[in-house]
Amino acid sequence: MADTKSIEALSAVFTAGVVAGTLVSARLAGPVSAVLFPLLLLPLLFREKLRLSPEKWAVGVCWLAFLLLGLFCATSRAVPGIEEPSALQLWALKAADALRARIDALPFRANSTAPLLKAFLTADRSGLEARTLATFRTSGASHLLALSGLHMGILYVLFDKLTLPWGGSRTAAIIRFVLFGLGGGFFTLMTGASPSIVRAYLFILIGEILRVSGRPRKSSRVLCLALLVQLVLDPSVFRTVGFQLSYLAMAGIFLLYPVLESWYPAGSRWNPFRRIWQASALAISCQLFTGPLAWLRFHSFPRHFLLTNLLAIPVTSALLSSAVAALMLDTLHLCPPFLITITDGLGRLLLWMLQVIASM
């Protein structure tokens, strides 16, 4: 029954069930989920007969069960109810307010730096000027303002480098996993738990679980498992553009990027021109997969997306790294003035670059 163990196949079948469930009206959602629940128990009741049945029948029942499970999750979620924020969510919102206040307290010379950092770290874009928002949109850098897997990935890489001195022991790996699981989850709640942030958090968390347990980490399987978990947690997220763009971008990275990256002649991995090609291939892969949906939904296509990604993403990574360091040291009252100057300069450099690209 190798097919039933393929997380890619099971997540695809489950996703199909979720899609079908989203098409059911709210009025029928309750009856449909009530009918599906006992049906989902049948494979458990007849598991001995399934074990003795031909493999193709067992595989078919397994796939049907996951299809109905996706349909059940979507319809049961659609039943009207009262949802109030939990104590943890309220705590995360208070932490976001405290972080915004801490950013405002840093003595940046440019008025644009603090609002930019609040957008990058707390998803609060209310302080950004209309001209700045237009610059990000025209230059094709809107994805930098919308908290996404890029931001979670940058923060994870920073966390990973900071914990390198701990070594590669199993104990260190477990401590890293626990700290990232708690910190990353809290950051996800603090920033509003957008679909792309949740996807990135689940992707990294599942990868860490596999690393701690010593099991092989195949990126496509990790992504499919993250998809499965995310849809179980909230099947309605399938309708959001952020969710669709996030997984399309990851599909481009897994399916197209390896092909484009392999076109560069073999050589040193530290070759700067190879690095430029890798960054270009990554941007092209994501854009080709997300571009059609973005055009259908927003009727726009960033003409300078390649130049924007080549220039803006490295600066954004440096800006977030220096900002996190400044905030951590400022909390301890140890932040040196030069770190504030560097962070301020990177923020102004990013805006200047995007203004130049937007004017082209």
Image (cartoon, rainbow, N blue to C red):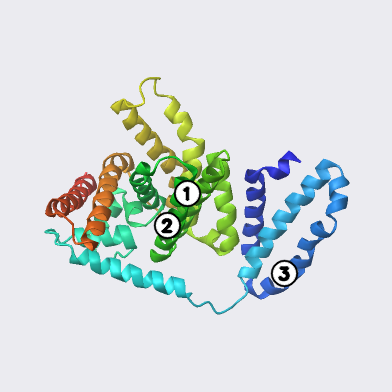
Residue position for label 3: 32
Image location (x, y in percent) of residue 66: 70, 54
| Quadrant location, the N terminus | top right
Mark 2 or mark 1: name the one nearer the start of the chain. 2
- All told, the count of numbered labels is 3
| Distance in Å between CA atoms under marks 1 and 3 | 34 Å
| Distance in Å between CA atoms under marks 2 and 1 | 9 Å
Q: At label 2, which amino acid type do we have?
A: Gly
Q: Which label was assigned to residue 204?
A: 1
Image location (x, y in percent) of residue 331: 24, 62
Instruction: Please name whichever residue, 263 or 90, is drawn nearer the observer in this view of the structure.
Output: 90
Callout 3: SS? helix
Instruction: Please name whichever residue, 13 or 22, is drawn nearer the observer in this view of the structure.
Output: 13
Do residues under tags 1 and 3 come within 8 Å of each other at their CB atoms?
no
| Quadrant location, the C terminus | top left
Callout 2: SS? helix
Mark 3 or mark 2: name the one nearer the start of the chain. 3
Instruction: Please say whether residue 148 is visible from this viewpoint.
Output: yes
Q: Which label was assigned to residue 184?
A: 2
Q: At label 1, which amino acid type do we have?
A: Ile
Going 78% across and 62% down the picture, which residue do you hit? 41
Do residues under tags 2 and 1 come within 8 Å of each other at their CB atoms?
yes
Instruction: Please name whichever residue, 1 or 326, is drawn nearer the observer in this view of the structure.
Output: 326
